[in-house]
Image: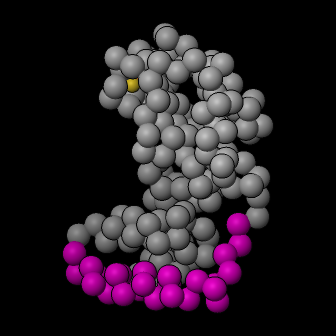
Amino acid sequence: MQNVLDLTAKKAEFKQLKTYMDSIKDSQGVLMQTLHKAQDIFGYLPIEVQKFISKEMDIPLAEVYGVATFYTQFSIEPKGKHKIGVCLGTACYVKGSQLVLDKLAKELNIKVGSTTEDNLFTLEATRCLGCCGLAPVMMIDDEVYGKVDPKNIPDIIAKYKE
Ligand code: FES
């Protein structure tokens, strides 16, 4: 997928990021804070945003890219409107969460870790979500689905297409 950001359309967002960067420039961990803020503003960290941060902070682009790709909380790819996370922690795995994940991938016609062409869904595997008693568990945005049966996946997904 080609991720070219229209810089002129995002002028206000870059200005917002610059204002934030100016406000924290003397604090610790500036790059991490900046990347978090940038992801909040843009939804992900495209190369244009990484270049902007590199230039403004006067650090190599490779360093910005390295941090942006090292930490799982950052994404350099655009995310779908709805984020689906299927827990592959031990409790969920033994209760069949891999089947849930496979069914979602088939239903959405995407691979795990990618986004549907209409940008509606991003599918990811996650670690333990902290509600093992409900295994197998998945989350769609902030909503937790417990004891998920793969055969119910089409109905669950349909709700988010409305
Ligand atoms: S292992 Fe899935 S919620 Fe804990």
Compared across the picture, whether 69 is left or right of 107 comes to: left
Q: Position of residue 160 (x, y in %)?
A: 61, 45
Observer-nearest residue: 137 or 68? 137
Q: Position of residue 113 (x, y in %)?
A: 63, 41
- Residue 131 against residue 79 in the figure, above or below: above
User: At 54% from the left edge and 63% from the top edge, which residue is drawn?
Assistant: 44
Res. 113 visible in picture: no
Q: Which residues are magenta?
A: 3-27
For the stretch drawn in magenta, the main secondary structure is helix
Q: Quadrant of residue 149?
A: top right
Number of labels in the image equals: 0
Q: Is residue 25 magenta?
A: yes
Q: Is residue 88 magenta?
A: no
Residue at far left of view = 27
For the rendered model, the colour scheme is: one colour
Q: Quadrant of residue 27?
A: bottom left
- Residue 132 against residue 79 in the figure, above or below: above
- Residue 85 against residue 121 in the figure, above or below: above
Q: Position of residue 14 (x, y in %)?
A: 50, 84
Q: Position of residue 70 (x, y in %)?
A: 48, 51
Figure quarter occupied by ligand 1: top left
Q: Quadrant of the N terminus?
A: bottom right
Compared across the picture, whether 60 is left or right of 122 comes to: left
User: At 46% from the left edge and 88% from the top edge, which residue is drawn?
Assistant: 15
- Residue 30 against residue 114 in the figure, above or below: below
Compared across the picture, whether 145 is left or right of 31 comes to: right
Res. 133 visible in picture: yes
User: At 68% from the left edge and 30% from the top edge, which residue is drawn?
Assistant: 154
Observer-nearest residue: 55 or 146? 146
